Image (cartoon, rainbow, N blue to C red):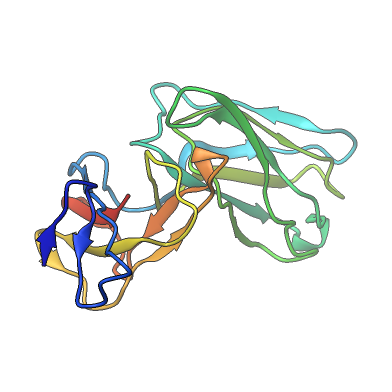
Amino acid sequence: MIKRSTGEFQTKDWEHNAPQFEIAGKLWTEAEAVAADGDGIVDGGACSGTASVTLTPGEDAAMPCARNVTATVAATTVGNIKAVKVTVYGTNIADEAISEELPAFTADTAGTVTGAKAFKTITKAVVPAMDGADVTVDIGWGDALGLPVLLDHNSTLYATLNHVRESTAPTVAYSSEAVESNTIDLNSALNGKEVEAYFVI
């Protein structure tokens, strides 16, 4: 195809040119693309049977990069686990203050819930009262990596893990308004090897 002065490319359909786009790439280093860690931010945060509690990151605890957040609940007596929603506070990849209410735990069941927003930092997590004081909550990160762009559709071309192209397309969430809602989740689990993604902007 021939590129015209308008920036578009001439096609065989003379009345309709092909618009010009650019391809952007994003690299996540080995330190950023570490495996998911369910208690990387808060390990065994004690809950209350009567009031909400605020959990704060442990000493030297930090997100490896902008990643989605997970919360894991456990208890000596699982019947004390209540179907409450943890609210996480922190910042996004642009250092803007954000928060997210995670999905509710399943009553009387130990398990993990997964958030959708990418947090660069976490300042605190608020856990509503449980049905007993023997309940603990871990806060960590999942496999979804935050993208530094606002997308209005999934324009991802492909992704690589350890320089090998993923044969299955990654799962991409997008938003043209909130950068923290733009994430990419490879089909393969992250394992501390470099990740690259390429998309049209």
Q: Quadrant of residue 2?
A: bottom left
Q: 153 and 10: which one is in front?
A: 10
Residue at the far right in the pictured view:
50
* Number of marks in the rendered image: 0
Nearest the eye: 47 or 36: 36
The x and y percentages for residue 13 are: 26, 77
Q: Is residue 91 left or right of residue 120?
A: right
Residue at image point 62% right, 37% down = 45
142 up-or-down from 90: above or below: below
Left or right position of 73 against 48: left
> Which residue is depicted at the point 51% across and 40% down?
180
**In the rendering, at what x and y percent does residue 74 appear?**
65, 55
The x, y position of residue 64, in whole percent, is 33, 36
Estimate the x, y position of residue 36 in percent, counting from the top left: 38, 53
Camera-side residue of 69 and 174: 174
For the point 56% across and 39% down, the residue is 178
Q: Quadrant of the N terminus?
A: bottom left
Q: Quadrant of residue 20?
A: bottom left
Q: In the figure, residue 90 lies in which quadrant?
A: top right
Residue found at the far front of this picture: 15
Is 128 on the left or on the right of 16, as rendered?
A: right
Q: Is residue 154 above or below residue 22?
A: below
